[in-house]
Image: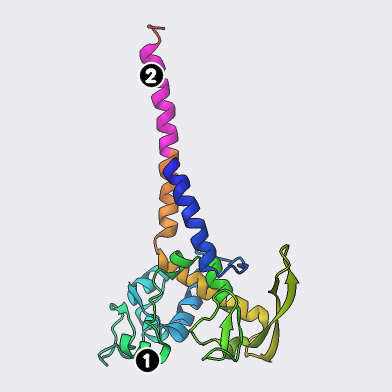
Amino acid sequence: MRNLLIAFFLFVPSLVMAAGGAHLDHAPIDLTDTDSLKRGAKSFASYCLSCHSAEYMRYNRIGSDLGMTDVEVAQDLVSTRDAKGEKTKIGELMKVAMTEDYAKQAFGTKIPGLSVIARAKGADYLYTYLRTFYLDDSRPTGMNNIAFADVGMPHVLWELQGLQKANYKTETDADGNEKQVFVNMEMVKPGKLSKEEYDAFVADLVNFMVYMGEPVQLERKSLGIKVLIFLFILAILAYLLKKEYWKDIH
């Protein structure tokens, strides 16, 4: 119990730091919604897979889990060329052509893979992060992010969401120090999608990344419930058997 408490108090601050201290919006995750996962998979292949790999996932695994044919997988998910310039097969891992050297030159850092990003950061963080980019002339990309301050990644979804600015207000704390507190976002240039449509788009994308982080999550939870039920019944039978064995002694 002591070790569990220590692990808990070490883990919680890391979540707060990962979120940059920002309020995280709840992500509407539903891994039973296959249509949402299909839309998210297509969006991931279209907008994320150009730079970020998903090196622990295979294209045909997604097709098998989501009920997609090989033709649908090839059309909607598979990139035309791999890192060697050869045509990608649906049985291959979801890698990208971008090399680490080019990534460092273009973005100043290695581009992380996204296979288990939802498990590392959490669905709420990803959902908030993809919706809180805002204009910031002080940044090299011209954009910043509420959930990830001074982010190096450009806002690749800006055409869908539009361009927005962050409004802040000045507050004074108990020690008399002034600080800037985020208030809201103000749309500067509308995107192709409305706010509701963009939120739904991001929800599908995050839903897929949660699935990708643990494709067998639903099966694991279902099996866990069955195991607990079995152990509960076994405990009752063991108790009754113990009473039968010891009834003549007491």
In depth, the one of 97 and 3 nearer the eye is: 3
Mark pair 2, 1: CA separation: 70 Å
Task: Report which residue position mark 2 lands on.
Answer: 242
Amino acid type shown at disc 1: Gln
Residue in the picture at 45% in, 34% down: 232
Q: Quadrant of the C terminus?
A: top left
Q: Is residue 13 left or right of residue 135?
A: left
Residue 168 lies, with reference to residue 116, above or below; the image says below
Image coordinates of residue 220 in percent, x first then y, are 41, 54
Q: Is residue 102 left or right of residue 46?
A: left
Image coordinates of residue 166 in percent, x first then y, are 67, 82
In depth, the one of 178 and 162 nearer the eye is: 178
The answer to whether residue 35 of the structure is visible from this angle is no
- Membership of 63 in magenta stretch: no
Residue in the picture at 38% in, 6% down: 248
Q: Quadrant of residue 4?
A: top left
Residue 93 lies, with reference to residue 142, above or below; the image says above
The magenta-colored residue range is 230-246
Task: Report which residue position mark 1 lands on.
Answer: 105
Q: Residues within 10 Å of mark 2 (few under 14, many from 20)?
A: few
The answer to whether residue 197 of the structure is visible from this angle is yes
Amino acid type shown at disc 2: Lys
- Disc 1 element: helix
In depth, the one of 69 and 165 nearer the eye is: 165
- Membership of 239 in magenta stretch: yes
Image coordinates of residue 98 in percent, x first then y, are 34, 88
In depth, the one of 89 and 51 nearer the eye is: 51
Image coordinates of residue 151 in percent, x first then y, are 51, 81
